[in-house]
Image (cartoon, rainbow, N blue to C red):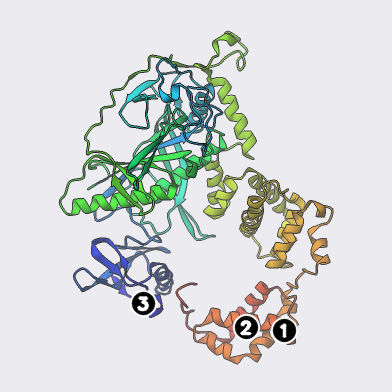
Amino acid sequence: MAHRLEIPKKLRGPGRSCVNGLAATISSRCIAQYVTKTQERLKLGSKCVTVPSYDREHGKKKTVIIELLGCRFFMHQAASSKAARSFVVDSYFPVVGLEIHAQISSKSKLFSRAPYCFGSPPNSQLALLDVAIPGSMPVLNKRCAEAAILVALGLSSRVNLISRFDRKHYFYADSPSGYQITQHEVPVAENGYLDYIWSANGIRMNENFVVPLTYSANDCVGQSYFVSRARIRRIQIEQDTGKSLHDSQRGRSLIDLNRSGVGLVELVTEPDFICAPQAAAFIHELSCLLTFLNVCHANASLGELRVDVNVSVGPSWSDQGPRTEVKNVNSIRGVMNAIEFEVSRQVELLRTNQNVTNETRAYDPVRGITLPMRDKEVIQDYRYCPEPNLPPLRILSNCYQCNDSRHISSAELNSSCLCLGCLTKEYQRLLSRNSPDGKLPNANRQRFALELGLGLQKASVLAENFRLAALFDSTLALLTVPTRIAGLPQHVSETKMRQELGFWICGQLHGMLKRDATLPLPPVEHLVEFIEMNLRGEIHGSSAEKLLKLIANRENNTKSPRELATAHDWILIYDETRIRPACVQVVKDNPGMVTLYSAGKRKKAVKRLVDKLMTHQKYKAEKFNQYVAEKIIQTILDSQTEGAPPDRLEGGTS
């Protein structure tokens, strides 16, 4: 049964454009909190509530149905809501595939010795081959081939021991040779995968997905996740093209060939994505892997990571219509916007009985839309043929350097012949050097988020920063020693320890490292003592922040955190027996706040009482731990106002 809720006027926001001309008259961010609290009061299960809305197109009142699912909600027909999403739009199912082009970090280009650096003067970094001068011959850059194999190992792909290069013919101004050297028939690797985690907050769980998804919830931080696996169809090496610079005011186009011939690793996924947040999470995870393996810096703003997005919609996951390809999107936000726009555009075409055509489109980052880029097409004929000037790329299983049999001579190892055994050892060295436990960033991200109960944001900081991850693991191991746990208050659990440690490492310490990458990290013993002081309530707020800065200073390594805090008079009173009398007195002196609390304005009443306690000289509370005092005042008010109404939602935020 649908429960109708009266939405307070404070929550009602401006109308927002939605699907089918429906304009919601409430702020989705505010209604999320209101609906969740109402659900908790009514103890609803998986039920619905209705909210009044208005159809501007027809001038009629309508109703938005909000479906309550546990602690989540989903607003039907509210396309602009980011707090709650559905994979299905107007009964149409979107499917997305990605082609990622990662620029290989190398001193020279793929088939020539010309260097490349972003931002150099136009056409200043060229070899004869890059401008297709007749007689110039390609020579494979060994570093680029090794980088592609490292990516294949990181994605658990099957490496082809023999692969070949092909010519992909097409006419475009930024390709002077009229073709691109790539790997079409036999790529360097195939059939890989990448597991990644992404936020599932506000997403319905009762749909049949195109790919299996593992759902997990973290009650400690109020987040829920999907753990997905993206299948990698193929990994191939190819050369980049030049860059076209269009001057619309003068009506001409300029060509910069500096990028022509730069080595790329192209990764083609299966169509395993069903919404924009999922695709964005995968691209972010992949960019972390590429950076981790020193294959690519993955700086999208410099053109080092570009994505082609393939989008189709249909009446079911298996029955899809023609796809459109959005070329060269160079940011994760751009990929999300392109997917959302394309899904909406194609659904609108189908709703109005129009046909979706197979075409190539470009993404406009200013307006967040896609535009036709080339003529409508059914099948593009690139006239692939083997590259006659390059031998097949041979990859040996082992060699004399990685195998004692020594049946392979060093003369056989050249730019077109690599050793998989040696590259596997190099891959293992990268794992041990860049990860505290020898795991890839995606595995560490899942461990921090799911096993240790940190939020996804903190897990990402640790997974992408080796120094902080190592510091977190070392500190947590020492912090959870039974003898140390015995010295903490009884209400402090191991989960609370992990949360407190993650708060300081992923917050202030991470910010300090971003400002100065050479900053030394505090000793583990000092950080453990600092966390214990926070858990006991001896330090709090700005004093704790100042103390952590002192701990990270090399000059203060000889002093313990307690000595530093005592020297600066930062130690707080956290004993409840010493704080309670002053709290009782401040409640007694302000009966109006008790009345306000009884009327449902709980947060406002508690905040005002804490402010009076900490600022009035009468109570001598300058050294009180404010957090402990707030809990005591809350307990006192609860005991004096039993049966008071639940806290009201004030101002639309909690």
**Kind of residue at badge 1:** Pro
Mark 1 or 2: the one toward you: 2
Query: Percent from the top left, x then y, of residue 619?
Result: 73, 85
Q: In this view, does 606 lie to the left or right of 211?
A: right
Tell me if residue 77 can be seen: yes
Mark earlier in primary sequence (2, 3): 3
Residue 408 visible here: no
Q: Is residue 566 above or below residue 99?
A: below
Residue drawn at x 64%, y 80% as measured from the top left: 610
Inter-mark Cα distance, 1 to 2: 14 Å
Q: Which mark is residue 200?
A: none
Q: Which of 5 and 367 is in front in this view?
A: 367
- Secondary structure state at the residue bearing disc 3: loop
The circle on residue 609 is 2
User: Which quadrant would the N terminus be assigned to in this image?
Assistant: bottom left
Relative vertical location of residue 551 with respect to residue 189 in this rendering, above or below: below
Asked which quadrant contains residue 13, the reply is: bottom left
Separation of residues labelled 1 and 3 (CA atoms): 41 Å
Q: What element carries label 1?
A: helix
Q: Mark 1 points at which residue?
A: 581
Mark 1 residue crowding within 10 angstroms, few (<14) / some (14–19) / many (20+): few
What amino acid does circle 3 point to?
Ile
- Residue 44: give x, y in percent of width and height: 38, 69
Identify which residue is drawn at 73% across, 72% down: 574
Left or right for 231, reference 357: right
Task: Name the residue that disc number 3 marks.
Answer: 7
Residue 56 relative to residue 14: left or right: left
